[in-house]
Amino acid sequence: METVVSGIRPTGMLHIGNYFGAVRNFIQLQESYPCFFFIADFHSLTTHPTPGDLHGSVKRVLAEYLAAGLDPEKSTLYLQSDVPEVTELYLYLNMNAYLGELERVSSFKEKARSQPDNINAGLLTYPVLMAADILLHKGTRVPVGKDQEQHLEMARTFGNRFNRLYQAEIFPEPQAFSETKELVKVPGLTGAGKMSKSAGEADCIYLADPADSLNKKIMRAKTDSGPAAPGEQPSQAVQNLFDLMHLVCSSEVCAHYRETYNLGTIRYGDMKKQLAEDMERFIAPWREKISDILADDALLARTAALGAEKARASAAATLQEVRSLIGFRKFY
Ligand code: ADP
Ligand code: TRP
């Protein structure tokens, strides 16, 4: 049986990278499979948010999940911190996760470089907690963007290791999943790499961006000094704009700008104006929905309570098996 599990860290607003990499797949998958979608608030503690920021971001992501079309009746939509069983499984998996393999994970190496003053143990064992999230519900399909591929590999390693150690087939192998076959990588506007909150405000197009700031950000996006010689590939920054166009513009519009690029007659200003217009059309319906849901505390409370109940039932069943395999026996 297929079971879908995925989560997003609450570190501000959702951007279109989160949408195309993850949430779009969540919405499709909830129609066909049992799904567990959560807000990874334990994970977000690696960067030490203030209590106010943490709560505000969790609330935003919950509202944005609902606005994007996640249905709390069809799927299990919950906060990771409402399911303490995940921390217990994390502890067990940590006993068989080794320093060498954890230190080799690229996201750890990158964080250790970018925040040398805060290389905490939670950062090192981030992939173990992520494996616990997935294995807790015996997840088989994990809709994520391309940047999470290595973490999925680790989840398979930890699950298989546990199975071998206790000679049980308790955890199936989770696979990264995207409807588009290839895992998605949405580029950012600053030309730096994948769109990411940690690359700053100017890099991201948020689902809730107001029209004027959306327009400004796109018009300021990095380009280059002009088309390359005929037949040459566009620079990375210009290729990023083409990639973003493919997400929201019609195929005729994409073909038109590709052709003017090849002819050397392209005007980047026109191309960005077109992208800004189509992006505005794409995100406009969400803006209002998100603010309505954010104001609906009763809906958010109902959603979180229902999700917590369903997620805990699934988690408790797995933990019971895990404890018994490990050898914990009650004396009372
Ligand atoms: P961020 O990198 O902005 O902090 P997260 O790490 O919280 O975002 O990502 C949550 C989900 O969104 C993951 O499944 C991740 O793979 C996906 N994702 C994030 N950024 C992108 C992107 N630029 N392209 C594709 N998927 C992405
Ligand atoms: N690590 C993921 C990210 O940064 C978020 C995440 C935490 C996750 N636990 C997960 C994704 C379990 C899928 C499954 O985007």
Image: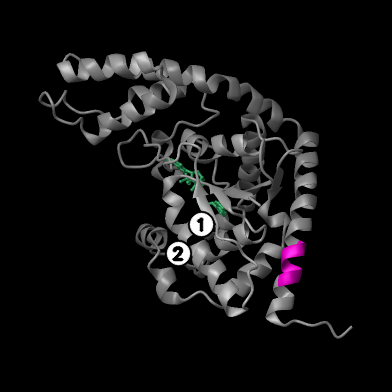
Residue that carries the numbered disc 2 in the rendered image: 118
Identify the residue at horizontal 73%, vertical 38% (top origin).
74
Which of the two residues, 111 or 52, is positioned nearer the viewer here?
111
Look at 64% across and 48% down and name the residue there.
38
Image: magenta residue range = 316-321
Q: Residues within 10 Å of mark 1 (few under 14, many from 20)?
A: some
Above or below: residue 277 compared with residue 144: above
Residue 10 higher or lower than 215, as above or below: below
Label for residue 316? none
Between the residue at mark 2 and the residue at mark 1, the CA separation in whole angstroms equals 8 Å
Name which residue lies at 65% across and 30% down. 67
Label tally: 2
Q: Which of the 4 quarters of the picture holds residue 272?
A: top left
Q: Is residue 13 at least partly visible in the picture?
A: no
Q: Position of residue 299 (x, y in %)?
A: 78, 34
Eyeballing the image, is 244 above or below 130?
A: above
Q: Amino acid at mark 1?
A: Thr
Q: Residue furthest right?
A: 332
